[in-house]
Amino acid sequence: MAKRKSAKSSINKQLIIEAFAEMARQKNIDRDLLQGIIEDTFSQMVRKKYGQDSNFDIIVNMDKGDIEIYLLREVVEEVEDPNLQISLEEANPEKEEYEIGDEHLTELNLENLSEFFGRRMILMAAQTLSQRVREVERDNVVAEYSQKVGEIIVTEVYQVRRNDVYVMHNKVEMRMPRNEQIWRERYKKGESIRALLKEVRVHEGQGQPEIVISRSDPKFLQRLFEIEIPEIYDGIIEIKGIAREPGERAKVAVMSLDERVDPVGACVGMKGVRIHSIVRELANENIDVIPWSSDVKQFVTRALQPAKVKEIAIDTETRTATVVVPDDQVSLAIGKNGQNVRLAMKLTGYSISLVKEGGEDIELVEFREEVGDDLFKLLIEAEIETAKEFLKADPATLLSLEGMTPEKLEELRRIMMAEFEEDELRDIDIRPVPIAEATAEPAAESATAGNKSAEAPEQGGSTEQ
């Protein structure tokens, strides 16, 4: 029968446990998990000293702050492997009743760890322990914050860099990349900000996970509506879609599940008090709240508000909508730099082509990619908002715009003219480009710019003044 040696080492091992326990408390590691980490760390040390085949028991008493390690060896007549065997004579120093074949437990003296295991092994063990603690800490963070993805959290800015803002939440670092920020906002160290917990990324070989937050994601706007509008939180009103250009403008489609509740009125609130609390949170981002409809024509019409639509044709197969609007509503339908029609397309999922009521025409926004963003803005400022207005415009006026060259002017004319039938261009008097070097085919005409109407008050709920 195996007997345990009665001699005990007098070392105070409590300091070791306390050091480990303090580290675990700082890293928020479970007590039982810490005990397992300590046992595993010392197991590796013992196996390196006594071999992989060695048998031993490790007892960690967290309450007393004590560690005991017992080496289990077989009692033999002649020792061949001292790590696995002990002689009968050594096993019975005080004539204890050990016999050949018995198992003998020897308590290892841990009074001087560096002397017993060697300084190098102690350093390796410390590295192993630190690595295990970091792994557990990482796993805890991943588990905790993965459950919070899609929720709004309150964080504190602690570092602002050129492209990223770093924040802290319960001592956990998070990052808000430039594309997740509201462009007009400026963040300061120490200020509290609300943001959507968007993603938890775990990168192989990196200690801590990367937690990404966002203030520009449409989901952030949705969560703000759920917080500020009780009817949405209670499920009486449902958000059917959100289209957003952060810091500028957003369109939110809502539907009431109770016919007695007006979805737009409930979201806007008395004198706009509800919607304005959201607007302030989003750096004064204008928010249009519109009633959702299963009727595509009606939904597209509402999505183009505040513009009034005269006529609309829907092609469900290609998901396109051709919308006829009165001349004085074109500017409203397009919006600043094409923003209104762009948001309407995002919200409805339909490609929208705007046509003036006075005749078939194509909005300039349809050629934005060919024109280029900077030149497109200059043309809109010059009140040239449709293809026909561009074709009729004075070439000298067009060439005075920064970025417009004779070659580009001719190319844009060819692209736009290709979109019309010959008889549709019959009434347009195209004059040649007044540049000697220009050899391209004849082009455009005198400048009559489309009259851009002042914005009218929006229908539905809106925060735009």
Image: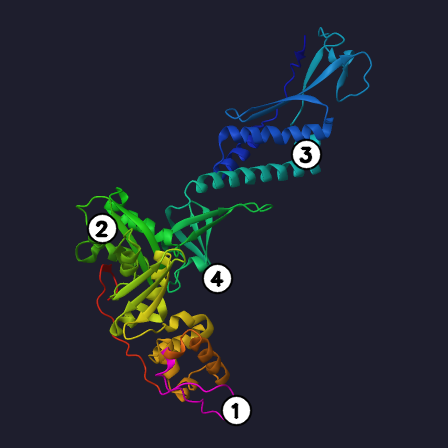
Q: Residues within 10 Å of mark 4 (few under 14, many from 20)?
A: few
- Give the residue type that dot 2 points to: Pro
Instruction: Identify the disc placed on residue 360.
Output: none
Instruction: Identify the disc placed on residue 437.
Output: 1
- Give the residue type that dot 3 points to: Ser
Tell me whether the residue at label 4 lies in contact with that at label 2, contact meaning CB atoms closer than 8 angstroms.
Answer: no
Q: Residues within 10 Å of mark 2 (few under 14, many from 20)?
A: many
Q: Is residue 142 visible?
A: yes
- Give the residue type that dot 4 points to: Asn
Distance in Å between CA atoms under marks 4 and 1:
45 Å
Distance in Å between CA atoms under marks 4 and 2:
38 Å
Distance in Å between CA atoms under marks 2 and 1:
61 Å
Query: Quadrant location of residue 51?
Result: top right
Query: Quadrant location of residue 109?
Result: top right
Q: Is residue 283 visible?
A: no
Badge nearest the viewer, 1 or 3: 1
Residue that numbered label 4 is attached to? 163
User: What percent of the width, then of the height, locates residue 315?
Assistant: 36, 58
302 sits left or right of 378 in the view: left
Residue that numbered label 2 is attached to? 263
Segment colored magenta: 424-446
Query: Quadrant location of residue 363?
Result: bottom left
Distance in Å between CA atoms under marks 4 and 3:
47 Å
Magenta span main SS: loop
Is 441 one of the magenta-colored residues?
yes
Tell me whether the residue at label 4 lies in contact with that at label 1, contact meaning CB atoms closer than 8 angstroms.
Answer: no
**First in sequence: mark 2 vs mark 3:** 3
**First in sequence: mark 4 vs mark 1:** 4
